[in-house]
Amino acid sequence: MLIATFNINGTNARLPRLLEWLADAKPDIACLQEIKMMTENFPVEALKEAGYHCLVHGQKGFNGVAILSREPATEIQRGLPGDDSDEQSRYLEADVMGVRVASLYLPNGNPQPGPKFDYKLAWMQRLQAHAAGLVGRAQPVVLAGDYNVIPNDDDIWDARRMADDALMQPGSRAAYRALLWQGWTDAVRSLHPKGGIWSFWDYQAGAWPQDHGFRIDHLLLSPLAADRLVDAGVMKDVRGQEKASDHAPAWVQLR
């Protein structure tokens, strides 16, 4: 089973690239972030023709997550629990093909310090609380998405360049580590322990041609999912296409 996570940075702008990627990579499950449109506007018919069922949690112009799957999925949770006042569309959870999957898009948190960084840390605390109830489930669980956290200095081409960024702050990294300590496995990291694997390259300053990237798209596996781990990585070539997202899909293969 191939499960991928892909921040597409706008459905309207990337739909041709998304359809090409689905046809080429053929993931069984694809978790999307930053779809940047209302739920009712998502191109369900085009994706149905491509062979995918859709669950969508959209938002006008910002954020938004979706789960695409070869087989129909059963929605379990729309929106991250813990704050009824949070109206941002950043979390969607479903049962599909015997696996519990979540597509999540964590807040960026910049500029920091400030209210946006406070919201990021509060969101991560809510994620920890919810994930604690998922990690021990009697089915494989995969938390896939854009975490907006660079976990280690070797997950970025030059750690000094972003030392003040919200993605690298001690609080952000500590919150990510707290998830791992619950028993989750960072799939890509577990198979590439020396780092040097990027999933994001900025549009600015020649980041892509110079390979000045970093890793913020992660797939966290529960123990039952980790037991089935075959391979994991990043589909880097997707980033080099015309009018590509600034992210490349990260993926995991499970038995």
Image (cartoon, rainbow, N blue to C red):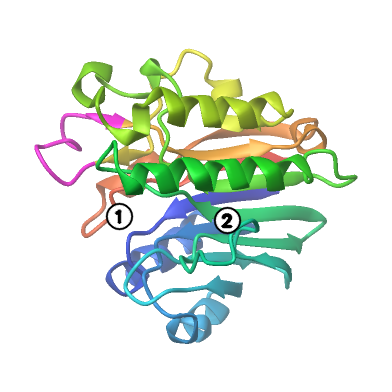
Report the mark closest to the observer, 2 or 1: 2
Give the structural element (helix, strand or loop) at label 2. Answer: strand
Residue 16 x %, y %: 34, 70
Return the residue found at the far left: 205
Taking the spot 63% from the left edge, 32% from the top edge, the residue there is 179
Q: In the visual, does 101 lie left or right of 114?
A: right
Regarding residue 102, the answer to whether it shows in the image is yes
Give the structural element (helix, strand or loop) at label 1. Answer: loop
* Residue 135 or residue 7, whichever sits in front: 135
3 in relation to 215, above or below: below
Regarding residue 51, the answer to whether it shows in the image is no
Taking the spot 45% from the left edge, 81% from the top edge, the residue there is 43
**Amino acid on which the number 2 mark rests in the picture:** Ser
Q: Earlier in the sequence, mark 2 or mark 1?
A: 2
Instruction: Give the residues in magenta.
Output: 202-213
Taking the spot 54% from the left edge, 72% from the top edge, the residue there is 57
Residue that carries the numbered disc 2 in the rendered image: 103
**Amino acid on which the number 1 mark rests in the picture:** Ser
20 in relation to 201, above or below: below
How many neighbours does mark 2 have within 10 angstroms: few (below 14), some (14-19), or many (20 or more)? many
Q: Main secondary structure of the magenta part?
A: loop
Q: In the visual, does 68 lie left or right of 195?
A: right
How many neighbours does mark 1 have within 10 angstroms: few (below 14), some (14-19), or many (20 or more)? many
Residue 81 x %, y %: 65, 58
Q: In the visual, does 172 lie left or right of 223?
A: left
- The image quadrant of residue 202 is top left
Residue that carries the numbered disc 1 in the rendered image: 245
Which disc number belongs to residue 35? none
**Which quadrant would the C terminus be assigned to in this image?**
top right
Q: CA distance from mark 2 to mark 1?
A: 17 Å
- Tell me if label 2 and label 1 are in contact, CB under 8 Å: no
Residue 199 part of the magenta-drawn span = no
